[in-house]
Amino acid sequence: MSIVHLETITKRFGDVTAVKELDLLIKEGEFFTFLGPSGCGKTTTLRMIAGFYYPTEGIVKFNERNMTTVSPENRNTGMVFQNYALFPHMTVFENVAFGLKVRKLSKEIIKEKVEDVLKKVRLEQYIDRQVSQLSGGQQQRVALARAIVIEPDILLLDEPLSNLDARLRDEMRTEILRLQQEYKITTIYVTHDQVEALTMSDRIAVFSHGVCQQVGTPTEIYNEPINDFVAEFIGETNLLSIDYVSKTPDLHSYQLCELDCKVEVKNDGANIAAYDQTDKLSMSIRPEAVIVSEKSLEGLNVFKGIVKIVQFTGAAVHTYVELNETVLIESTNLNKGPATYLNVGNEVYVQFPAEQIRVIPEMKKI
Amino acid sequence: MLNAERRKTILLLIPVFLILGGYVLYPALRTALESIHKNGVFSLQNYSDFFGAKAKANFEALWNSVWISLASVFFSACIGLPLAYIFNRYDFPGRKFFAGIAIMPIVLPSLVGVMAFMFLYGEAGLIPNAIKDIFNLKNVPFSIGGISGILLVHAYTMYPYFYMTSSSALGNIDPSLEEAASNLGASKFKVFWKVTFPLLTPGLVAAALLVFMVSMASFSAPFLLAGGFRVLSLQIYFSKINGDLEMAATQSVILSMVSISFLLFMRWYQSRKDYRMASKGIGAHRSEVNNPLLKWVMVSIGILAMIVLLLPHATLLILSLVPDGAWTWQTYPQSFNFENFILLFEDPYIWEPVKNSLIMAFLACIGVFIFGIFTSYALVKRKFFGKNLLDILVMIPWALPATVVGMNMILAFNTPSPFSFGKVLVGTFWILPLAYFVRFLPLVVRSTNAVLEQLDDSIEEAAQNLGAKWFYTFRKVVLPIIMPGVLSGTLLAFVQAVGEFPTSVLLYTIGNRPISIEIMNQLRMFNIGQAAAYGMIQVGLIAIVMFISSKFLGVKAEKSLG
Ligand SMILES: Nc1ncnc2c1ncn2[C@@H]1O[C@H](COP(=O)(O)OP(=O)(O)O)[C@@H](O)[C@H]1O
Ligand SMILES: [Mg+2]
């Protein structure tokens, strides 16, 4: 178990800057996730922690120990690769025992440890199988067992579930969490899947183009995104560009550029992100916060529109309302039966509750 | 960047460059140097002689080599491509069996193959004489020799290059592409010319370049069949025999230039981005031949082709059963028994060449095996400056005609050099294993490259992440995974070294004369049976190796030709 401390890390490949001035402190025993679209530098960061790349600038520390140029075999991290990277010529036992053999443990202890960990990942009956004879989910578990059995200080997982089908993915998600909590290993998890990140993590770092945009708990990231990229990348949202107009102690007033009318936002840190004078601003409101009604609505920020699409997904119903030619607002409600569905073509009232809006600046371009 | 990694790479590269420099580059440079000397003084006389009127034979030989090679490409393509198309696109009884037979020419070592052709279709050959007797003709109706002989042998031994590349390319074409074209209204003929053929082109060009190079380098066929006809690879041998090393060097340089420019052209061609199949691994779909007449025509053609293809093998077997003195002036051999094989194992003098060949090929293969693995590992898995240079250095012996490799060896090691530890190697036992090593190194490197490229980098990283040091990872993870590929390459190098003729004929001594030289001796003494028995040993070895490769190492016979 270790603290991982990345101090202003930059990694360049020729002209490409894969990671830029990254500062991160990952706590002991934490389940920490790197989230971002593909190509944003998650793998590169992970590989710098594992030691496969050395940072161009900056320092990697485990527990105050400088590890920046320590070679991978001396870092005691356990990595699970995207393609599992199981040794194809070995059995399940030999795969899992590999790291222990390298550590020169006695035969009996190796056997005991391997059997123990295979029981934990529920593979004890496959111990003598050739790895090629296992299914995808089982191979994934062998890879996990192989990484955990060496009792690593840090567990590193690079999109470990992306090769599995949806059902297995759910199952393995729980499995990984269970193992992590049982062993209490500091875990760094890389994914581009926001649902995975939100459901599993203690904290998340959101990346874009090699820059870490925001670090926070899943609720912080979802409810209080610091810029338009984070707001759009995590979950669904309605994003409208706005300009600052005026403020009172309770409310800030903004002009909606595309609608030619005002919107009022509660004056609170949870509703208004930090921004500079020069930033282009947007407001974001989650579909589940948008109120749509056929009857006229009381209060602030009420607009008129026409229902364009009603989409039924089972648990929820999405209603798309057109406010004018360029603005289409999505609203999501739990399914409460056919009587509550709106009809396409009807005129409706749409409300953005002032305490549900978040004002955010545009992501800084690098 | 990575200091420890860098150090490992450099440690790996030092021996690799030393050996390649010493045994590939240095000999080639010695040859180049020799070619610009006349009687020991610097001069370009050799080159002006080569292209001038004084040694017209040389220029003629170069020209002959070129057009013979072009013709060989043409004939090989004419046989290989249609055969591949028929076997991959039509289903008829016995298709699989015939397709297997189609690659049989590759189990015939070149010298032995040429010998079989001589006794089959030559002036005193079995086929022309049989036709003469059956139809009561006065003279043999036809016989091969000179140009026709060389071309026939080339077509027979080289069409598999076309056959195999077209087969695998055809197998890789997504059938839905052709179906899409038909669906859009294209006729069968149009589909072939507008869709299938363009997709085959990259493979066909590669095969054509390969056949051209192989046939420029061809030695055994002209050696046995050419008569007065001159080709460049043979001229080198004659110059050397006549003691004109400087001219031999000049001829070698010119032949090398042709070959190396082809190598570079081929590298460039293959590195170009070409349209690869978007989807892969879809089994070829074959049209079943339903018309019974057509079906039986196809089967009969198949059977006929099979007989023609296997006749040389059969001839070799029959000849090997003819005891000494049982076939002198008669048209056909008179008696058959196992005397030649029994002698082989009982008479130490007759056994000796076999022993020599096996020992020398074994020594060369140990070297090729160890050195090939490390070279290939450096090439595929390490990043360093000068990688392209290394790649080219390794491939040079593959591009160079065997005769040239032999000449390079002579010119480099007929004087003491640091790479031979200050000894003269020419005239000793060691020169031949060394020549085999140089000649077959590319083969092992290529087959090892193929398996190493398959090996995902993350496998090695996983081992490292679990705490294993580089050498431990290499021994316990990398080696076991790539071993089948490396072994099959090495085994192939072994059988080729056992049958190697062109370098042997330039470098052998009485003490280490290999099988191929003894075959020549026996032929000269008209002891055809014994020569064929030696040939059968080679064919047997090749058959065993192919069997092992496909059975235990999971390598397809077609692949092993490389
Ligand atoms: N070994 C490398 N050499 C050159 N460029 C690289 C290398 N690895 C990654 N990159 C580049 O760095 C950027 C980030 O890549 P990566 O960390 O793999 O992204 P992610 O894992 O988030 O999808 C990409 O633009 C990629 O092309
Ligand atoms: Mg990645």
Image (cartoon, coloured by chain):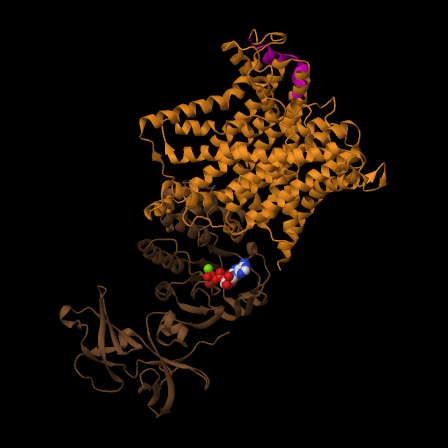
Chain colours: A brown, B orange
- The reply to whether the magenta stretch includes residue B324 is no
Q: Which residues are magenta?
A: B336-353
Task: Work out whether residue A291 can be spotted.
Answer: yes
Using the rendered view, name the quadrant where residue A314 is placed. bottom left
Q: Position of residue A325 (x, y in %)?
A: 29, 78
Q: State left or right for residue A136 relative to residue B505.
A: left
Give the residue drawn at x 30%, y 80%. Answer: A356
Using the rendered view, name the quadrant where residue B329 is placed. top right
Q: Position of residue B137 (x, y in %)?
A: 53, 11
Using the rendered view, name the quadrant where residue A294 is placed. bottom left
Along the viewing direction, whichever of A192 and A189 lies nearer the viewer: A192
Q: State left or right for residue B93 relative to residue B355.
A: left
Give the residue drawn at x 14%, y 68%. Answer: A338
Q: Position of residue B408 (x, y in %)?
A: 73, 36
Along the viewing direction, whichever of B125 and A230 lies nearer the viewer: B125
Q: Main secondary structure of the magenta part?
A: helix
